[in-house]
Amino acid sequence: MCRNEASDLEGGAPAVKDETTFEEEGSDDGHDHHGGGNNGWCRGVIKEFKMTIGTHWKDEMTNMNFRTIGVSFFMFIAAVAPAITFGAVYAKSTNNFIGAIEMIVATAWCGIVYGFIGGQPMMINGATGPILAFSTVLFKMANDMDIPFLTLNAWTGIWSTAFMILAAVTDLNRIVGHLTRFTDEIFSGLISAIFIIDALGNPFNTVGVFWFFSPKHRFHEKFADDPTYSRYATAFLSCILCFGTASGAFKLRGMKRARYLPNQTCRNIVCDFAVIINLILWTVIAKAGFKDVPVETLNVPNFFAPTLECCDATCRTSFPFDCPEQDAAWGRRSWLVNLFDTNGKPWVPFFAAVPAILAFILIFLDNGITWHLIQEPSNKLVHGRAYNYDTIIVGALIGINSVIGLPWLVASTVPSIIHVQAMSDKDERGKIVHVQETRLTHIFIHCLILGASFALQVLKLVPVPVLYGVFLFMGIVSLASNEFWHRFNMLFMQQSRLPDEPFTKYMVHRRVHAYTLIQVFLFICLVVFRSIPQIAVAFPLIIKLCIPVRAYLLPYCFSKDELILLDGESPVIKKLVRKYEKEGRDGEMVLRESKRNVGQLNAAGFDYADETTRA
C-alpha cells in the first residue's frame, strides 16, 4: 500500500487526507523536497540528470564572487585536515595499506569530479567514522582468511558500486523520503558533538587540545630527553591557539553586521575570510611569537607516493610491521590493485558480495541522511534533490577508488552543513533567506587539496591546535542550526522565558520536553554504539531504527498537530499556524485544548495515523 500524500506534507508523520489537511503541498520554493515517488526503472536518474545538467549547471559554474574565494579557502582547511587525520587512522588500522596520501588523493580527485557533474553541489564528500570502522573490520577479516586486503577491499567496493547502481535505477532512495527532522536532528547533533569533542578532548582516545596536559600524549615522547621541555607550556599555548582561532573566527564572522570598516563590501569580505584569516594569524603567532615552545604540527608524509612499503615483490605484507628483520623495504605498492591476487582462493570475488551488503547499507545511510539534512526546506536550496543520480556518481567513485586502492568517500555531514551555512545570507534571527548554490567552491576546494598533495611540506607548518580551533568553530556553527540542540537547552530554562517558537506557543511545554528526551535517549544510544569499536560498524543501523520510532511510535504519543510543530518542515508549520489564525485560535486557546487532551489518545488521534502504520 502506498503512503498517503498528506504524509509527505507533515514531516513524515503518517496521516490521512481529510478536511483538516492542508491542500497546499510542497514547500514554498515549488520543488519536490521529499524524493522518491513513482520514478520507475531509471526514470528518477534521468529526471535528476536533466535537472542537474540542463537546468542549473551553467549558473552554478559562473556565479563567481569574493564569497566563493573566501569559503573555498575555509572549506579547504575544513576538508584537508580531516583527510590527513583520517588517513593517519587508516594507516594505523590497515598497516599502511591505505594512508594519508591515499586519503588526500581520493578527497581531491573525487571532489573535483563531483564538483563538475554531481547532482547536489552543496554536498562535500569525505571520509566518515562508520566507513573507517568497516574498513578496519574488513582488514581483520582479510588477515584471518589469509586474503590480500587490497584485493578483498577492491572486490567489496566493486560489489558495493553494483548495489548502489541497482538502488538508483530502482529508486530505492524513496526510503530517504521517510526521514524527518526527528532523525536528521539526532544525527546532525551527533556529528556536531564529535567535532566539538574531538577538538577539546575525546575521552576514548588522545585526540583534542586538553590531552596535551597528559604526560602520556604521544607528542611529549619526542622530548623525553630534553630537560628544558615543559609539557605545561606546550599545553597552555595549544589551548590559546585553539580557543584563539575559534573565538577570532566567530568575531570576524560577526563583522557583517558591525559598524566598522568603510562599507558593507569590506565587512562581507572579512566575514567570508574569517576562518582563513584566523588560521594564518594564529599560525604566525605560534611560529614567530613562541618559537621556543614546541607545538604539534600536522603529521604529513614527506613525499607523494603510496603509503605501503612492501616486504617483498608480492606486496602482500607491510614494512616494517610484517618483516621487522629487514633493514629496508623492497619498494612501494603499485597504484593499481591486482584484482586476481587472491592467494590461491578463486572464490574471493564472489565472497566479497557478502561484506559488500553491509558496506552498501553504511554508504546508503551516510549519504541519505546527509543529503536529507542539506536539502531541508529551511535551507532554501533551489537546485532540488538528485538522490538517485548522486547514488550512481558516488557509487562509481567508490568503485574506481577500490581498484586504485584508495579509501571510500561519501557525503560528509558537518562540512556539507558548514558549506551551506557559509554560502547563505541570513536575516536578523539567523534564518536562511538565500543560498548561493555554486559548483565553483567545490571545485576550488578540491583543486587546493590536489595542489597540497604536491606541497606537503607547507601543510606541516600548520599547528594541530589551530586546526582544533577550526573544528571547534565548525561544530558550534553546525549546532546553531539544529533545533534539537535548542530544545535541549530549553530543558534547563524557566518556562516563562522560553523562546517564542510555534511549538512553545501552541504546545504544552512538558510535551515538548518529552519529545526532546526521546531524542536525547536515541542520541545517547548512538554515542555508545559509536564509542565501542567492536560494534561501531553497526552504528548506521541504530540511525535506521530512528525511522520506525518516528513513523510507528511517536504518532501514538503525540497528536498530528504536535508532530507538525515539532517535526514538520517549515512551510507546513507556517500553514498550520495560518490555519490556527484563520480559525481565530490563539496560542492560549490551543494550549488549553491541548491540556485537556494530554494523556488521552482520542478518536481524532487515530484519524491522524495512517492505516499502514497501524498495521
Image: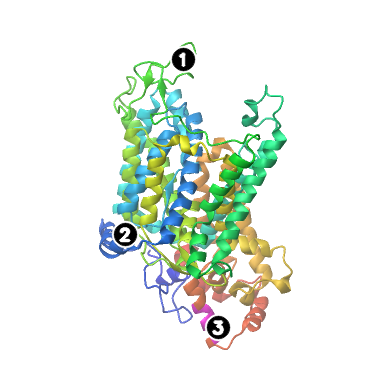
Q: What percent of the width, then of the height, locates residue 353?
A: 35, 36
Residue contact between numbered discs 3 and 1, judged by CB atoms under 8 Å: no
**Residue under the point 51% across and 29% down:** 92
Q: Secondary structure at mark 1?
A: loop
Q: Which residue bears the numbered disc 2?
A: 61
Depth check, front residue: 573 or 227: 227
* Mark 3 or 1, nearer chain start: 1
Residue 542 sits above or below residue 455 on the image: below
Q: Which residue bears the numbered disc 3?
A: 580
Q: Is residue 227 magenta?
A: no
**Residue under the point 57% across and 59% down:** 252
Q: Disc number at residue 323?
A: 1
Question: Marks 3/1: CA distance?
Answer: 74 Å
Residue 259 sits above or below residue 319 on the image: below
Tell me the quarter of the image containing the N terminus. Answer: bottom left
Depth check, front residue: 410 or 477: 477
Q: What percent of the width, then of the height, locates residue 127?
A: 45, 43
Other-residue count near label 3 (Cα within 10 Å), few / some / many at <14 / 14–19 / ≥20: some
Q: Secondary structure at mark 2?
A: helix
**Residue under the point 52% across and 60% down:** 270
- The region drawn magenta spans 575-581
Nearer to us of marks 3 and 1 is 1
* Mark 2 or 1, nearer chain start: 2
Nearer to us of marks 2 and 1 is 2
Give the residue type at disc 3. Tyr
**Residue under the point 43% across and 62% down:** 375
Residue 382 sits in quarter: bottom left
Other-residue count near label 1 (Cα within 10 Å), few / some / many at <14 / 14–19 / ≥20: some
Give the residue type at disc 1. Cys
